Image (spheres, rainbow, N blue to C red):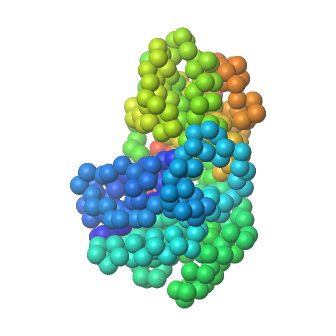
Amino acid sequence: MKIFIVPMAAMAETSGPVSRCRSLVKEFMKAGMEVATCCAEDVNFRPLEGIRNYYLDVPMPMGLPAPIAKRVFPFAQKTGITSRKRVDSFDQVLFMTGNLDYKYINNSVSSIRKAISEFHPDIIYSEFNISAIIAARIEEITLYCTVSYPTQHEYAHKPGLAKDLNRYLKETGLIPVESALQLFDLADKSFCPSIPELEPVKKDNVFFCGTLKGKRNYAHIGSRNSIVVYIGNGTISANNMKKVITKAFSGSKYEVYIASSYLEKEDSGNIHIAHRWNFEELLEEAVLFINHGGQNSVVDGLIHGVPQIVIPGNVFERKYNAECLEKKNAGAIVTTGKFSSDVIRSNAERLIGSEEIRNNACELGAKLLYAGGVETIMSEISDNY
């Protein structure tokens, strides 16, 4: 069986789709399937050894010309200009990243269809990539999608952003939509990498698979001494994040690891900065995970039994995830207006010192680990073939 995986592309730092893509590739290969990917070589791209990756276009934010976008957007991300933009639905994410631009849709669907003609997949797996959904429906190939609770059309959508998309859909004979999010309902089956306690999606063709990563035993709390920080983009500026985190924990007993593609590599005492870290290793040794509230980050923290401080900013999905985590008493929310070294330090002391909060994180993590992962996806695939 041949499976073709296409994660969402973006010039912005967004690790979720690509990291899940990597996990899917690894597990599908273990099951003896032939796998190929169609990953844009954007800021999130990392090659997978032994896997053919077909070309996919990189969208330009807001559909801006590439020379302008490549200069302006990184500056806006690093300085925090993008963090002031309120994002109320996933439609806006797709629009701002350029995934709803007519020229991009036209080019990216063409690229995916070209790859399909060469690879001849039995299944297309879309990791939040709408161009892959369109290509699968045009080519009439079985389509699987990753979904989440707050990215559903029913949860939140922004009318008026689908003009370019509908132009393309009409040209290709597909039915126009009110919102790009309705395209996810075209999947034959969809998988939510979470659990009902965190994301209560209620659709017949949606299956909960929890984390796509393997089962593990939690490290004893006494052996942990790290704080992991990943804020991504669109929440606060990288420079401000570095300043606040450094002031909060510099000279403390914890080793602090900050991941940001917008900061230079640095080691200063117990503060360590790099573009990327191996979160699998670091979270095993962590007493606290400070992040932006992306689904992937929240799940990663929970499966390692780590309490979390979440700074979701003005992004609807991150705010939902953060509120859910706080309601489950497994973490705390810090708004951008209260993001200071004193607030971060006091919340850190409270979370790290609470056995109840650690236990709650571990319980949720255990449910995510035992929800089936790729085995659930494999079971649904075998039902069709």
Q: Nearer the viewer, residue 167 or 184?
A: 167
Q: Residue furthest front?
A: 67
User: In the image, what residue occupies the spot 58% across and 39% down?
Assistant: 78
Q: In this view, does 349 lie to the left or right of 140?
A: right
Q: Which of 287 and 98 is in front in this view?
A: 98
Q: Which residue lies furthest to the right in this view?
A: 337
User: In the image, what residue occupies the spot 73% across and 50% down?
Assistant: 86
How far from the left and from the top, in percent, is residue 12? Answer: 53, 50
Q: In which quarter of the image is the C terminus?
A: bottom left
Q: Which of 106 and 380 is in front in this view?
A: 106
Tell me: residue 239, above or below residue 57.
above
Q: In this view, does 66 lie to the left or right of 179?
A: left
Residue 364: in sight, yes or no? no
Q: In this view, does 132 lie to the left or right of 64?
A: left
Tell me: residue 70, above or below residue 352.
below
User: In the image, what residue occupies the spot 43% across and 64% down?
Assistant: 57
User: In the image, what residue occupies the spot 54% across and 35% down?
Assistant: 230
Task: Report which quarter residue 203 is drawn in.
Answer: bottom right
Task: Report which quarter residue 217 is drawn in.
Answer: top left
Q: How many labels does the image show?
A: 0
How far from the left and from the top, in percent, is residue 211? Answer: 47, 48
Q: Quadrant of the N terminus?
A: bottom left
Q: Is residue 123 left or right of residue 201?
A: left
Residue 7: in sight, yes or no? yes
Tell me: residue 248, above or below residue 131.
above
How far from the left and from the top, in percent, is residue 48? Answer: 30, 52
How far from the left and from the top, in percent, is residue 45? Answer: 40, 51
